Image (cartoon, rainbow, N blue to C red):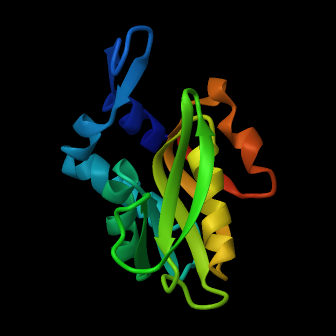
C-alpha cells in the first residue's frame, strides 16, 4: 500500500447504518479537513492526465474536482442533478438501487475534442460515472479517464466502465 493510500484510509471515518440500516458510510470529511492530506489527494488527482477540462459529479465530486482543475490548469465543469443548471443542457438517465436518476451538463461546457477527466469521491455501482461519460462524449469531448478518491470494489462499478481508464486512490 502506498503512503498516500495509508494517509487516505487513516482519514476516512466509517459511519454505521447511515443513511439507512445496514449501510457502512465512508465519511471523507476528516480527510478534507486535514490540509496536508487534502493537498496530497488534489495533487495526485491533478497529475493523472493532461486535460482541458475536469468534470465534477454532484455533489461531493465538486469538492475534489474544483481544486483538481485549478491545480491542473484546466477548466471545471459541473455535472448536476436534473433541473439544477440554468442554461441549455444535455441529460442522461441511469438506474439506481431503487429507481433512477438523471444528470445534466450544459450543452456549451466543452469545445469539440476537449480532453476530459471525470472526478468523483467514490466509485460504487458505476451508474453515475457511466452516465457522466455518456454526457461528456455526447457533448463532443473525449474522456481520458475517471479518477476517484475511493472505489468500493465489492460493488463492481468498474465493470460498467469498460474501455474507460479508471484510477482509484484507494480501493476498499
Closer to the camera in the image, 165 or 76: 76
In percent of width and height, residue 87 lies at: 39, 80
Residue 1 visible in this rendered orientation of the protein: no
Residue farthest toward the top in the current orientation of the protein: 22
In percent of width and height, residue 88 lies at: 46, 80
Vertical side of 104 occupied by 160: above or below: above
Q: Quadrant of residue 116?
A: bottom right
Closer to the camera in the image, 91 or 22: 91
In percent of width and height, residue 101 lies at: 52, 45
Q: From the viewer's perspective, is 133 left or right of 164?
A: left
* Residue at the image position 56 percent from the left and 40 percent from the top: 100
Vertical side of 34 occupied by 147: above or below: below
Q: Quadrant of the N terminus?
A: top right
Closer to the camera in the image, 39 or 13: 13
* Residue at the image position 71 percent from the left and 58 percent from the top: 165
Vertical side of 116 occupied by 113: above or below: below
Residue 84 visible in this rendered orientation of the protein: yes
Amino acid at each position: 500500500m502506498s503512503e498516500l493510500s495509508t494517509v487516505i484510509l487513516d482519514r476516512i471515518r466509517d459511519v454505521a447504518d447511515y443513511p439507512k440500516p445496514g449501510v457502512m458510510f465512508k465519511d471523507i470529511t476528516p480527510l478534507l479537513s486535514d490540509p496536508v492530506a487534502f493537498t496530497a489527494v488534489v495533487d495526485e488527482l491533478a497529475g493523472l492526465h493532461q486535460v482541458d477540462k475536469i468534470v465534477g459529479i454532484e455533489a461531493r465530486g465538486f469538492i475534489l474536482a474544483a481544486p483538481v482543475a485549478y491545480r491542473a490548469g484546466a477548466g471545471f465543469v459541473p455535472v448536476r442533478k436534473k433541473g439544477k443548471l440554468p442554461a441549455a443542457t444535455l441529460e442522461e438517465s441511469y438506474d439506481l438501487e431503487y429507481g433512477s436518476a438523471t444528470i445534466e451538463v450544459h450543452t456549451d461546457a466543452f469545445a469539440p475534442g476537449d480532453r476530459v477527466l471525470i472526478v468523483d469521491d467514490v466509485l460504487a455501482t458505476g451508474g453515475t460515472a457511466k452516465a457522466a461519460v455518456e454526457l461528456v462524449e455526447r457533448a463532443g469531448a473525449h474522456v481520458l479517464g475517471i479518477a476517484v478518491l475511493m472505489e468500493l470494489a465489492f460493488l463492481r462499478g468498474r465493470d460498467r466502465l469498460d474501455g474507460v481508464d479508471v484510477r482509484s486512490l484507494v480501493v476498499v
